Each structure stands twice: as C-alpha cells, then as structure tokens.
Image (spheres, helix red, strand yellow):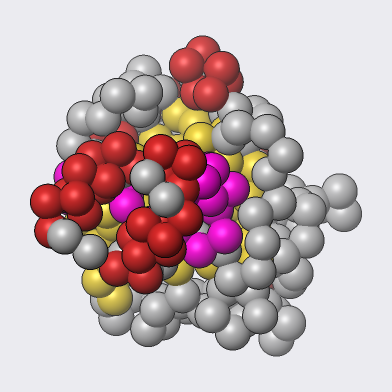
C-alpha cells in the first residue's frame, strides 16, 4: 500500500488513547511501598477510613482485592477522561473471573481523607489463605503516553471502520490496511479494544482500561482484561455501572 494512502487511512481510522507502560517491581501486597494513590497493578490501594464499612466484598463477605487503579491526575489530558480522581478495579481473590468485580471512583476531595490500612485491617487473613490467587502477584507501576490506536483484534467498531474503507476505496484496500497494521494489543486507556475471541458489546461503551497479559500478569493463556463504561456515565462521572470483561483462550 502507498505510504501516503496508509497515513490518510490512519487519520480516518485512528482513535486517541493513552498507552500504559507497566513496570514490574519486587513488591507484593504485603511489602508494597508505592504511594497509596499511585497508578498501579496490585499493591495497597487508597481507601478512606470513613468508608471502611463500604469496602467491597462478595455476598459471602469475602473482601475483594484491588487489581488495578488509575490516578487520572497522572494521565495526560484526553477528551472525555477525568483530569483527577482515582478509579479502582476490585476482583474476588478466590475466583477473580466471577461476577463480583467492582469499579470504584474517588474524587479529589475524597482523596484528601484519612486512609485505612487496607492490608492490616482487611486483607491480611484472606491473602494468607492457600486458595488466594490473583492474575498478578507483584506490583506493577504505570506510566502513560499520548497516542493513537489504529487497529484491533475483533473490535466491532474497528470492523465497521474497515467496512467504510472498503466502500469508499475498495475491499482490497481495506484488506491491505488490515494487513499493514495488525492488531496492537498492549495496555491502554481509550482507543480500540483487542479481544482474543470476540467483542461481547452490543452497544457503544468507552474503554476505560485495557490490560494485556505480559510478564508477571496472566489472565490464563493470552487473556486481556477490559473495563467498560457507557459514554453518558463517563460524562456524568458515574462509575457504578462500569464493568470488567476478560476474555482468554
């Protein structure tokens, strides 16, 4: 494909995103020394002491474990995203792919509150249980880069964009584009979504988070975790209906 045409198609198809660079540390939950409000995978989360009774649990009372948190003040500004506040993803440490996941968001004012010692006061007993298991054991720090997503694996919206190229140019041009820019995978906020099997969405959702399997983070074999939110809820700052979807081979 001609490079000029390729660049023009990338401008048409590209979706803005914030790429996430994950760096493994030697810390575990027990030894975490990262900041409570820092963007990270695993580790000790920030949780206000005044809300200790509201700490997320399963119906059986098992405390969930924070798998990832994003401090939006650390993310380069992007249209539609909060510019501050902390989003957290909680999973069941004894069956992390069940439907007990929770998405919690703390705003700037809440982040000024006194935090509870989550490990000592809530998690110590369950982490010491032999059945405890999470997709990552060590803390991974996060850095963010501005960028665009130009391709995807099985994203319905990406497939629609390829169809438009096929109609405007030709099916052959659409195929050449898809071949020239194969699925990116990786971890990001926004952009297209990569799936190992299929896109489960039947209506439009914004991708708040994609975390790909990499060294030290494993969603079974080659899995990818997503956090989705309805655009209206994102605009209103309502994270209650945001949800986790993980697919894998």
- Compared to residue 10, the image places residue 65 above or below, namely below
Residue at the spot 70% in from the left edge and 86% down from the top edge: 130
State the count of labels: 0
Residue at 19 percent of width and 50 percent of height: 5
Which residue appears farthest toward the left when viewing the image?
A: 4
Q: Which residues are magenta?
A: 145-163
Residue 147 versus residue 75: which sits nearer the camera?
Answer: 147
Please state, as top left, top right, bottom left or bottom right, where the N terminus lies in the image.
Answer: bottom left
Q: Could you tell me residue 83's position as x and y percent?
A: 28, 25
Q: Residue furthest top?
A: 236
Q: Quadrant of residue 198?
A: bottom right
What percent of the width, then of the height, locates residue 126? 67, 69
Question: Which residue does the image show at 65% across and 69% down from the upper left?
Answer: 197
Can residue 43 be spotted in the picture? Answer: no
Viewer-nearest residue: 23 or 116: 23
- Magenta stretch: residue 42 in it? no
x and y percent of residue 242 in the render? 62, 35
Q: With 40 as the anchor, is 117 left or right in this view?
A: right
Could you tell whether 77 is left or right of 105 in the image?
A: left
| Quarter of the image with the C terminus in it | bottom right
Residue 160 part of the magenta segment? yes
Q: Is residue 114 left or right of residue 98?
A: left
Question: Image quarter for residue 109?
Answer: top left
| Left or right, 247 with reference to 12 | right
Q: Residue furthest right?
A: 60
Q: Position of residue 241 (x, y in %)?
A: 67, 30
**Residue located at (35% from left, 28% from top):** 81
Check the image and report above or below for 168 versus 137: above
Res. 98 in view: yes
């Amino acid at each position: 494909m001609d490079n000029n045409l390729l660049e023009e198609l990338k401008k048409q198809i590209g979706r803005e995103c914030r790429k996430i660079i994950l760096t493994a540390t030697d810390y575990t939950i027990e030894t975490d020394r990262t900041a409570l409000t820092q963007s990270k995978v695993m580790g000790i989360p920030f949780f206000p002491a005044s809300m200790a009774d509201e700490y997320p649990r399963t119906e059986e009372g098992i405390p969930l474990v924070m798998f990832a948190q994003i401090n939006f003040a650390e993310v380069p500004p992007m249209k539609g995203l909060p510019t501050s506040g902390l989003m957290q993803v909680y999973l069941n440490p004894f069956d992390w792919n069940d439907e007990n996941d929770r998405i919690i968001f703390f705003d700037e004012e809440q982040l000024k509150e006194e935090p509870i010692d989550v490990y000592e006061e809530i998690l110590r007993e369950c982490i010491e249980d032999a059945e405890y298991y999470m997709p990552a054991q060590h803390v991974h720090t996060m850095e963010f880069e501005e960028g665009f997503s130009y391709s995807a694996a099985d994203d319905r919206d990406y497939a629609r964009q390829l169809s438009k190229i096929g109609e405007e140019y030709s099916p052959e041009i659409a195929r050449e584009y898809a071949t020239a820019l194969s699925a990116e995978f990786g971890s990001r906020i926004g952009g297209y979504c990569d799936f190992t099997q299929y896109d489960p969405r039947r209506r439009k959702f914004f991708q708040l988070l994609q975390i790909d399997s990499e060294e030290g983070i494993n969603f079974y074999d080659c899995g990818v975790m997503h956090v989705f939110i309805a655009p209206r809820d994102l605009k209103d700052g309502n994270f209650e209906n945001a949800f986790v979807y993980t697919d894998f081979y």
